[in-house]
Image (spheres, rainbow, N blue to C red):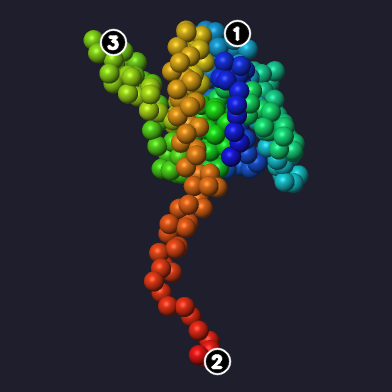
Amino acid sequence: AADDDDEGGGREKMILSIGQFRPEKDHGLQLRSFAKFLSLRDGAMKRTGAKLVLIGSCRNDDDRERVTELETLADELGVRDDVTFVLNEPYPVLRGYLRRASVGVHTMWNEHFGIGVVEMMAAGLVVVAHDSGGPKSDIILRPWDFEKEEEDSSLPSDSAKSANSTDCTGCLASTADGYAAAFYQVFSRDEEGESEVIEQIRENGRKSAERFSDEVFMDSFKETILPLFKNRPRLKLRWQK
């Protein structure tokens, strides 16, 4: 997974999507979510200069046609000038975007795992992933419940708010409204002087992504396999005495 040494304060108001342009990735949901986000607060979010970048590969002519359809959809939604498509670029280009972006978005329903989600978390993005499959069950185990946090903030004690803010590792959503609300929370906290909440989520995400590193995999593999060979006699061939 990518690592990022840049501080969050140097990041741009950019939402990043990474993945092949296949139909199951549901890039259309990303565009509709982004359009809703820009319309919030009477267009206040659009005036911040927020951008959506979709970076990925096209395998064939069908994929390239799909990108053309997505560009048309962006036009219809009125966000084409705020959306960038980055196609078939080498990995260093992706790393550059991972360093600059603030938010990562994933919209595939019931994806088995979601390595792109892990990659974005490891790079320090606040990831908004689909509320299903591997991202829900294996990766973002402590999602940010910002709606409950806002309710708790009206109470005399903010203990529940503090617990949620300090423990969560990202966000989950399944509708355009849900994604737009999550985008708004991340960007508006920075605007309202609550960037420490967002930075804590970034750090939590980085640490959580370490569970999927090569080192952790090898350690777990050895812990599982080595006991099978412990205290077992050395195998001998028939001709050996």
- Mark earlier in primary sequence (3, 2): 3
* Residue 194 drawn above or below residue 88: above
Instruction: Give the SS element for disc 3.
Output: loop
- Extreme residue toward the left, this view: 156
Q: Which residue is drawn at 47% across and 34% down?
A: 207
Residue 70 left/right relative to 149: right
Residue 18 lies in what quarter of the image? top right
Q: Where is residue 155 in the image (x, y as percent from the top left)?
A: 25, 12
Q: What residue type is labelled 2?
A: Trp
| Mark 3 or 2, closer to the camera | 2
Front residue (pair 114, 204): 204
Return the residue at label 3.
Answer: 154
Q: How far apart are marks 1 and 2 (CA)?
A: 81 Å
* Residue 120 drawn above or below residue 187: below
Callout 1: few (<14), some (14-19), or many (20+) C-alpha neighbours within 10 Å?
few
Return the residue at label 1.
Answer: 47
Q: How far apart are marks 3 and 2 (CA)?
A: 81 Å
Callout 3: few (<14), some (14-19), or many (20+) C-alpha neighbours within 10 Å?
few
Callout 2: few (<14), some (14-19), or many (20+) C-alpha neighbours within 10 Å?
few
In the picture, the disc for residue 239 is: 2
Q: Are marks 3 and 1 in contact (CB under 8 Å)?
A: no
Q: Residue at x 51, y 53 (%)?
A: 218
